[in-house]
Amino acid sequence: MQLRLGLSTDGVPMVERNNKVEKSAEELEKEKEKRRQKRNLRHAHAKGLMQGILSMLRPGDVVLDCGANVGDVTFPLAETGAFVHAFEPDPYAFGKISERCADLPNVTLHNAAVGTASGSVRLMRAANFDDNPKGGSVKSTVIAGGRNIDEADGSGIDVTLVDLPDFIRTVVKDHGRIAFLKMDIEGAELDLLEAMLEQDLFENIGLTVAETHEKKFHELRPRFRALRHAIAGRFPITKVNLDWI
């Protein structure tokens, strides 16, 4: 391998390997800080958006929390008096949210994943789940190919799969509309959001927010980009927001 020393634009030495310049430690730290700032801004935006959502919900409204985990969103939604359907497939997280919402009669918990069909599906957990179940449970996914996910033969858990488009249609038929839908399902949101767009299911939902996970699923990035473009062409961010975190 050919090595060649050079200087960055600010005079910091760099090593060039095979004509590819490696960034200096200072430049890497600057990029890391930019990513941190961007992430903090997204957190702040999501927190502000959540406060706005809570202020607009009224008793009797129907909301859906897909990927509820331990209930950090479910619980404040329920405090508004809205009827909450919370979907969480991971047994560990479902146990925690069940304890937390045990005394909330307006919360219906579904120990299930959501998708575009009904049946069962394999839930895969983070590779470090046994060492840190609380932190690992937020990464549980039904989509193969994610970073740091245990996909070994014999691993994973079979969980119930609920057809979310059908569920949405049933709720709309019974209640007229859904006030709010939050989706954070570790890559599985791609198929669902595509189906919801195709079937015009956003029309009867006041606000849909989703965290997309294209950074964790490299092969899905072109579809995520196409989805973002298609949704932005039809709906304002106040109707469908794909930058939830």
Image (spheres, helix red, strand yellow):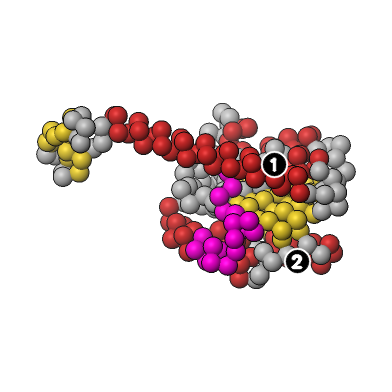
Position of 98 with respect to 39 (left or right) is right
Q: Secondary structure at mark 1?
A: helix
Name the one closer to the observer, 31 or 221.
Answer: 31
Residue 241 occupies quadrant: bottom right
Q: What is the crowding at mark 2: few (fewer than 14 residues within 10 Å), some, or many (at least 20)?
A: some
Residue 91 occupies quadrant: top right
Name the one closer to the observer, 238 or 185.
Answer: 238
First in sequence: mark 1 vs mark 2 = 1
Q: What is the crowding at mark 1: few (fewer than 14 residues within 10 Å), some, or many (at least 20)?
A: few
Q: Residue shown at 20%/35% (left/top)?
A: 8
**Quadrant for the N terminus in the image:** top left
Name the spot of residue 235 as percent of width and height, x first: 60, 64
Name the spot of residue 125 as percent of width and height, x first: 57, 42
Position of 230 with respect to 16 (left or right) is right
Q: For residue 51, which numbered disc appears in the image?
A: 1
Q: Please, what is the three-letter code of the amino acid marked with disc 1? A: Gln
Q: Please, what is the three-letter code of the amino acid marked with disc 2? A: Arg
Name the spot of residue 87 as percent of width and height, x first: 72, 49
**Residue occupied by mark 2:** 169
What stretch of residues is rendered in magenta? 227-245
